[in-house]
Image (cartoon, rainbow, N blue to C red):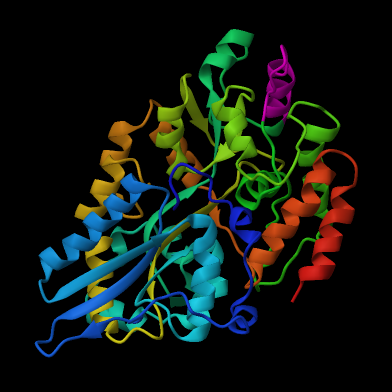
Amino acid sequence: MKHSIPRSLAVLAAAGLSISALAACGSNDGSGNAGGSTDADGNVTVDWSMWSGGTAEKDAWQAAADAVHTANPKITVKLETTSFDDYFTKMGTRIASGSAPCIVSVQSLRLGALKDGMLPLDDLIKSKSLDTDDFVPASLEGLASDGTQYGIPYDNGPMLMLYNVDRFKEVGVDAPKSGWTWNDFSAATKKLTTGGKYGFAAYPADLQMFPMLLSLSGQQPVSEDGKLALDNADLQAAGQQYADLVGKDKVSPELSGNDSTYAYNQFIAGNAAMVVDGPWDLLSIQSQSDFQLGAVEIPAGPSGSKTLSAGSGFGISKSCKNPEAAFEAIQTITSTEQLSKLASDGRAFPSRVSAQAPWYDNAFDGAKEALEAAGATAEPMRTTSNWTKVGSDLIQYGVPAMNGTSTVKDTFSQIQSQDAN
């Protein structure tokens, strides 16, 4: 997934539309020979679109593209990158207009918005003998729909509670341990909210909020049959408990504006002692912060600790002219060797178990134990095909609810009314 900046779906949502809606917009993005090409000598060029946060990240993906040509000189991967915030809107437009690149990068939360323009990969997995046993099962599940595999994952992981070890020591609060409860969490946030600093940084973005609501209520925002379920009374009650951390209990800073990096930045700045985030950001936070970083699973609710997982990977567009070459490229990009290199650079928490050791080598003490504990109860986060719109509305209407000027019941009910298919 995206490095350095939380990849809440809501970050993207402000610009996102469904594929069907985007089709009406037309497309002229300069994609040229989109879908790849083959010359008279049988040399194949495969185009690949990926999000990137800067030069270093782009260089890492270019190295992965170059590795494909090294492994098979008949295949050249032409990489193009765009910002994470723009990627999915542009890709939706290109898929709708039939001008998508061969290799489509996709986030698990947004698979539903893109999969109709992507090829099922099950036959290629079988014919190319891709061994899927090395992949974390949840990573494959996140890029599958109705039993059909649409993407091969490169990263995945459960959402965790990150905490500032130094701040806990400063205030004299015991660091959270595996098996801690919501009551433990609530007591800690109250003690840590002192001296102009807060115990926790809350925000109504999907990947930050719904793991906490799942642990409290056992409910996801989308039902198992893919229907939006924000009208679930248990989920709404859990959402109010989460919002009260800001508006009522005052243990999380008041929100202003629609900046989904707000909680993340409050934590890095030392203004909040805890935040919910994924393993893809741990090494980045570790390098940006000036305090000792700790991690533990989401505090347990009435039925124990639960959390959500998410990840990203690569699929093939239906407009790809050479799917077999594209799949061979994806096999190389998601190989143990390439994912180990990304892990060494701290750019992803690998979806392959065999590539995770380099990531752990760079992580802080306790990171592995926290990930394993959280992973044991993690569920892939379910989303709808219009989740882009839902995520945007969650932030637009959720910020006032968290500040206490409206209720979560009214907010979730309004979004349910607007966005349920």
Give the residue displayed 57% in from the left and 25% down from the top.
269
Above or below, comparing residue 313 to residue 399 in the picture: below
Q: Which residues are magenta?
A: 183-200
Q: Looking at the picture, how far across and down is residue 252, in whole percent?
A: 73, 29
Q: Looking at the picture, how far across and down is residue 167, in whole percent?
A: 58, 15
Q: Is any atom of residue 299 visible in this view?
A: no
Q: In the image, 41: left or right of 108? A: left
Query: Is 40 one of the magenta-colored residues?
Result: no
Give the residue displayed 29% in from the left and 76% down from the top.
125
Q: Extreme bottom residue here?
A: 40
Tell me the quarter of the image containing the C terminus: bottom right
Q: Looking at the picture, how far across and down is residue 299, in whole percent?
A: 63, 35
Query: Is 193 one of the magenta-colored residues?
Result: yes
Q: In the image, 333: left or right of 378? A: left
Residue 198: quarter of image? top right
Above or below, comparing residue 11 to residue 268 in the picture: below
Q: Is any atom of residue 42 visible in this view?
A: yes
Q: Looking at the picture, how far across and down is residue 304, in whole percent?
A: 64, 42
Q: Nearer the viewer, residue 154 or 104?
A: 104
Residue 26: quarter of image? bottom right
Above or below, comparing residue 159 to residue 15 in the picture: above
Above or below, comparing residue 285 to residue 70 in the picture: above
